[in-house]
Amino acid sequence: MGLLALDASKLSATANNPSKRKKEDTEHNEWIKKYHQALRNSREDFVKHHRSQYDGDLPIWVAVEVMDWGMLSHLYRFAPNPARNQIARECNMRGPQLESWLKSLNILRNYSAHHARLFTRVFDIKPKTIDDPRMKPVENVSHLVFGQLSLIQYLHAVLGTGNGVPDLAGVLESYPHNHLVSFHRLGAPENWRELDLWS
């Protein structure tokens, strides 16, 4: 297999943690099973091509296309510290900070994908704070929906990926404002539109 993630010896010790589901298995082995299941279930032409031409051996830039957000966040967690830190620096963070953000956003993504209630939801996992003035005004609401959406807004800003995606601020502004269901119960401060991150 060409994908380094398939070889636990190339990863951090975290990959060999016992699985929470099956104590006799490792987290990495459980991840491998999910990865192979994703490959089997894929109907993508690029997967068929790699199956026929390269015995299904996908390079990482192809393999990530079949991984869901949870698989990607675990892959980041398993990565050796130099690789984690290099990726985190692109986001102006340290490895543990980015890991906590990815975990938080995975939970947000799962709620959204399963049409769960987001309004007034309190998230159990609080992402680690970072030393960026744009995030200071939302540190105290990072466990609420607005704080979670601020993580996405920040990542778009720092990575320059916001072009061509739906305007998150516009989506929030389309929220029907009324006194019964207050927008600010999402955790947004009164002046949220004036914050550097959202202006």
Image (spheres, grey):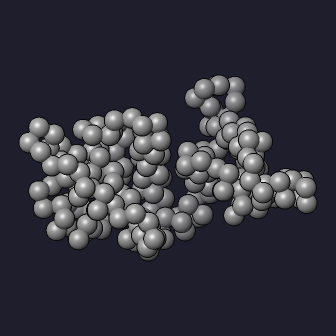
Image coords of residue 94 (percent x, y): 44, 62
Say whether residue 56 is left or right of residue 118: right
The quarter of the rendered structure image containing the C terminus is bottom left
Q: Is residue 176 above or below residue 169?
A: above
Which quarter of the figure has residue 150?
bottom left
Residue 69: percent from left, percent from top: 55, 49
Q: Is 181 on the left-hand or right-hand side of 88?
A: left
Q: Is residue 131 above or below residue 40?
A: below
> x, y percentage for residue 92?
41, 69
Say which residue appears at 20% left-offset and 48% top-offset. 176
Q: Position of residue 20 (x, y in %)?
A: 58, 29
Residue 148 or residue 173, whichever sits in front: 173
Q: Is residue 59 visible?
A: yes
Q: Is residue 34 left or right of residue 130?
A: right
Front-lying residue, 8 or 190: 190
Above or below, 160 against 16 in this view is below
* Residue drawn at the location 19% of the way across and 65% of the way down: 193
Q: Look at 62% across and 55% down and name the residue there.
A: 79
Question: Residue, x 28% and y 52% (percent of image)?
Answer: 147
| Res. 77 in view | no
Q: How many marks?
A: 0
Nearest the eye: 144 or 135: 144
